[in-house]
Amino acid sequence: QLQLVESGGGLVQPGGSLRLSCVASGFTFSTYFMRWYRQAPGKERELVARITNTGNPTNYLDSVKGRFTISRDNAKNTVYLQMNSLKPEDTAVYYCNAVRFDGTYWGQGTQVTVSS
């Protein structure tokens, strides 16, 4: 019933771009803050970006500022992460997260690999 499904990951060369999407179903998407996290092999999961329920982005990871942009379309129940000027150190599994005062939901993740 409750579901977050990420898509848009893949293999890209350094300097390239990807747009990740996360489509929500089974809950009132417009009442949740949304976050993107990532986890690289052997490293802890880290917060990449955050956006309020009304579309104000906050809390970008320092290493992605100026390169990544989070946005959402409540009419489509979708949150996006536009990733430009990608670097090898951006390689990770990217996870979509929905959070409200009374709970949180997680997607299964999508792999992003930046390599030449």
Image (tube, rainbow, N blue to C red):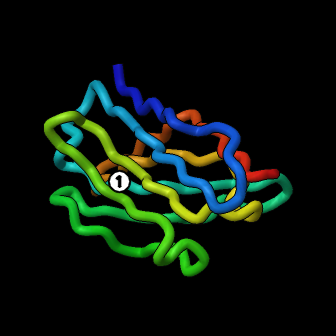
Q: Residue at position x 25%, y 62% from top?
A: 52
Quarter of the figure that contains the N terminus? top left
Residue 18 drawn at (x, y percent): 53, 48
Residue 36 drawn at (x, y percent): 48, 55
Using residue 106 as the reference point, say whether residue 25 is left or right of it. Answer: left
Q: Which residue is mark 1?
A: 34
Query: Is 67 rendered above or below residue 86?
Result: below
Query: Is 7 rendered above or below residue 46?
Result: above
Q: Could you tell me the amino acid type at mark 1?
A: Met
Q: Nearer the viewer, residue 17 or 9?
A: 17
Residue 116 drawn at (x, y percent): 81, 51
Q: Residue at position x 16%, y 59% from top?
A: 54
Using residue 17 as the reference point, say whether residue 93 is left or right of it. Answer: right
Q: Nearer the viewer, residue 33 or 77?
A: 77
| Element carrying mark 1 | strand
Q: Residue at position x 70%, y 40% from top?
A: 11
Q: Residue 10's quadrant in the figure?
A: top right
Residue 112 drawn at (x, y percent): 66, 45
Using residue 81 as the reference point, say whether residue 8 is left or right of it. Answer: right
Query: Is 86 rendered above or below residue 66?
Result: above
